Every structure is written in structure tokens, then in C-alpha cells.
Image: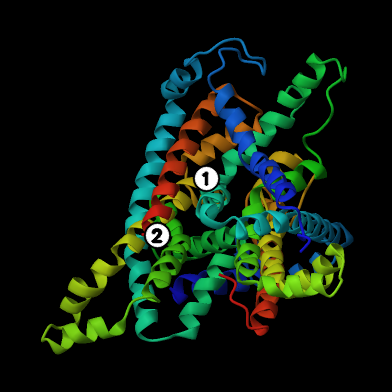
Amino acid sequence: MKRLFANRGLAFYAVLVYAFLHVPLLILAIFSFNSSKFTVWEGFSFHWYSAAFGDRDLIESAANSLIIAISATALATIIGTLAAYGLWKRASPLLAGSMYLSLATPEIVTGVSLLAFFQWSFRFLHFRLGMHTVILAHVAFSVAYVAVVVMARLRSFDPALEEAALDLGSNEWRAFQLVTLPYLTPAIAAAAMLAFTVSIDDYVITSLVAGVDSQTLPMVIYALARRGVNPMLNAVSTIVVFALGTMVLLSEKLRSA
Amino acid sequence: MTLTLAVPSAIIVADSFLTHGAYGGVERPFTLENYARLFDPLYAMIFWRSFWIAGIATALCLALGFPLALFIARSGARKNLYLSLVILPFWTSFLIRTYAWMFLLRDTGLINTALQAMHIIRDPLPMLYNDGAVILGLVYGFLPFAVLPLYATLERLDRSLLEASADLGAKPRDTLFRVMIPLCAPGIRASAILVFVPCLGTYLTSDLLGGSKTILIGNLVQNQFTASRDWPFGAAASIALMIVAMALLFAARRKGEELL
């Protein structure tokens, strides 16, 4: 049989597309070690890394980002897991539908709706935009990611196992805790890592709901990028990409475990 | 869950029918004027351009992604590794990946510097801050969205059908266009929607790579909520965007397809 595509040609094509996907970041990483300020290689140096660690804006915003991502991840993981478990026990087209919808909504729309919502609620509550609004916004958009990942795992869970635990005299909570939860743990861990990556990386929604005291790392990166290319930014990017990449690979491993 | 989505949406819908206040707030009376303004040639143009750019980016993603998905689906034992290589950039900072292209494309960026050093060009090519750069950034960002559903359908595709087509004398090109692509139609539709919807609402890519010249719906909405402080109009524009996204999703659902 004549092959539809010669396999070798297809492999060569794949190499090109993978290069397109990965080489730009690789180049960025290489040039982060360049001692020159310009796009000409002059020599190896850690100069831009020490500059980045010496920059107060960058360090402060990175700390903010970590606080936000950790709190949002914790909340979103709990809510998302419960939502997935609830949906598995009792189908709710409304809940499932709104979850898929929230994944498919363009970020900018989510951002402005949350902003309008916060401003409206400030009429009754004495709050202002700040870290807490950013955390709430992050919880709102990452819950759906968590629920989808946990739900995928629940599909392969045998309800008979939970029923067996109930028959053997445990109550519903104990059955969930001792039987269902351990089965879900890898998926929950994977989901938490994904929630963390989407939270720490978000710019569009965050920039809309952030207050003056809650600059996040992507916001500072964005502001620097808008002013043009900056070798310090190459160093920061390399650190972020490396850290997130490791986390995503780990999460993939857990998910397929 | 439903509440976290429903309440903010309800408020934005309400806002879109109100008048904007002198200090940027929202006031009564209720009005339809915000929606009428969307049909103003100036704004209609922005919508049209957004559709156009998102459409080209989607077509390119599909054209580039299809052979790659085919390659992964046929790669046997290494499948997981190749898939991870697609998924990895999908989860690592969209912002930083956009910045990487600024680093490559700008006037004193790597490509121009290299070409000048090789004496191929004298003056830098203006590669950044135009529609082409925006489309490139979108394709780069959303290619993984296109590959995953395509891969899922190609994986399930019965190869004996392709063999049958070849045995019956079809040329490879005919087999591709008349057998393979029609069989993969559900995956192609899912990919197209998954890419088109976020491209249509893009804000970051067009802002960083398109400069101030490329204003798309996303930038329009953001601008109304920040600099212009005309929330009702921004709300109306964002609802228009949402309606398009939802219409596409429901169209896909009616065909009984799982998007995720």
C-alpha cells in the first residue's frame, strides 16, 4: 500500500513544528546568560539573574504572586474537588454546563464581569480592590480546571467500592475519606498543580481586579515587556518557564499514574 | 459554582443597558444605546478585523496542527512523549511566550540582527507591531489547542478505511480530502472552535505584538473598563463577544460533540 504520507516526511514536518513551539523559549533562555545588553552574544554571565534578584518590584510582585497562587489553589482545589464529586453523585446539567462555559469564556470577559461584580459588591461591603479580590478571581476561574481533571478520574471509579464501604457500616463521610479520596489523590494533586500554574501565570483577569498593593509578577513582566525588550526579563522568563515546566510535567505524570 | 458565574454575568448584562456616569460609574436611565453604538462603523470595523484575524489564525492552526496530530497518532510507543511536548508549552506562561516573539521580531531583535550581520539586509525589517505579528503570536499560542482534539479523532480513525480507499485506486490526495478529512470532521470542528473563541477575545497578543495600531475586541473591552471608563459600552462589547462564543459552543454541542 502506498502510504498516504511518507512517514519520514511526516516526521521531518513534526520536527519543524516542535522547533517552532520550543526554539523561541530556548533562545530566550540562552540569551538570558548573555553578558551584553544587546542581542549579540558577548560572553556567559549571571549578570541579569543577579539584576533580577536585586529588583524590588520583581521580588515583591513574585512574593504577591506566590501568596495569591497558593491561597487560590488551596481554595479552588477544595471547591473543585467537591463540585466534581457532587456532579459524579448526581448529574446536574446546569452546574456542568456553567463549568464548561467558564472554561470557554474569553479571559477578558471573565475579567470585566468580575471587576463589575466586585465594584457592585463594594456598595454593600467596605472593601477595595486588592489581594483578596485577586485571590477570589483566581479561585473563580481555576475551579473549573480542577473539577474537569478530578471528574476525568472519577469516571474510572467503581461506585460499588463506596457502596461496599457503606454496607460494611461506615458513614458517608468516612466512606468518602477512606475509599474515594485515596483513589482521587493523584488527580487532585495534578489538578492543584494545574490550578497553580494558571493562577501564577494569569495577567488579563488579574490586571483588571488588582488594587494598588497587589501587583503580581505577570503584571510587572507585562509592564516591562510593553516598554520593550529587557535582558533582565529574559532571566525572569527563564526561571518562570523552567519552574512551571517542571510542575506541568510532574502533574502530567500524576494524572497518568 | 453556578453563582460565581451567574452573578457577575448578570451584573455585566445590567451594566450594558445603563448610561455611564460623569465619574466613570454606571447610572440610570436604562438604554439600548450601548448596543447601537456597536454598529457604529468604527466599532463594527474592530469586530470585523477581530473575526478576520481570528479566522486566519484558526485556519493556520488547523493546517499546521493536522499533520502534527497525524504524526503523533501514528508514533506508537513514543506517543506520550510527543504529546507532552505539545502540552508543555500550552501550560507554560502565555505571557512569556509572547514576549519571546518580541525578543525575536523587534528591530534590534535576533532575526534582524542576524540578517544584518550576514549582510542580507541593511535596514531592519519591520516585523513587530503589525497584524502579521499578531497572527503569528496567536498561532504560536493556540496551536496546542488545535492539536489535541485533532489527535483524539485521528487516534480513533480506522486505518483500514484509508487502505480500502487506496486499494480502490484513489490517489493519496483524494484519500486525504475525500476520506480522511470528512471522517475527522468532528475533531476539526472542535479544534476550530477551541482556537477561534480565545483568538477572537485575545487581548494580550494584540497588545504586545500588534502595538497600538491593532485594536481588537479584547483591547476595546479592556480600554472601556480602564482608560475610557465607559463601563456600559465595554459591557455591551463584552456581551457581544460572549454571545458569539456561546453560539459557537452551542452549535458544536447540538452536533453532540464533547469539546473537552
Can residue A177 be spotted in the picture? Answer: yes
Which residue corresponds to mark 2? A255
Which residue corresponds to mark 1? B92
Label 1's element? loop
- Closest to the observer: B255 or B150? B150
Chain bearing mark 2: A
- Please, is residue B61 above or below residue A105 in the view? above
The residue type indicated by label 1 comes to Thr
Mark 1, other Cα within 10 Å: few <14 / some 14–19 / many ≥20: many
Q: Position of residue B98 (x, y in %)?
A: 64, 40
Compute the Cα span from label 2 to label 1: 17 Å
Mark 2, other Cα within 10 Å: few <14 / some 14–19 / many ≥20: many
Answer yes or no: are tags 2 and 1 on the same subunit.
Answer: no
Q: Relative to A153, is B193 on the left or the right?
A: right
- Please, is residue B101 above or below residue B219 in the view? above
- Closest to the observer: B47 or A21? A21
Image quadrant containing the N terminus of chain A: bottom right
Label 2's element? helix
Answer with the quarter of the image where residue B178 lies: bottom right
The residue type indicated by label 2 comes to Arg
Identity of the residue drawn at 42% across and 20% down: A54
Q: Relative to B228, is A163 on the left or the right?
A: left
- Marks counted in the figure total 2
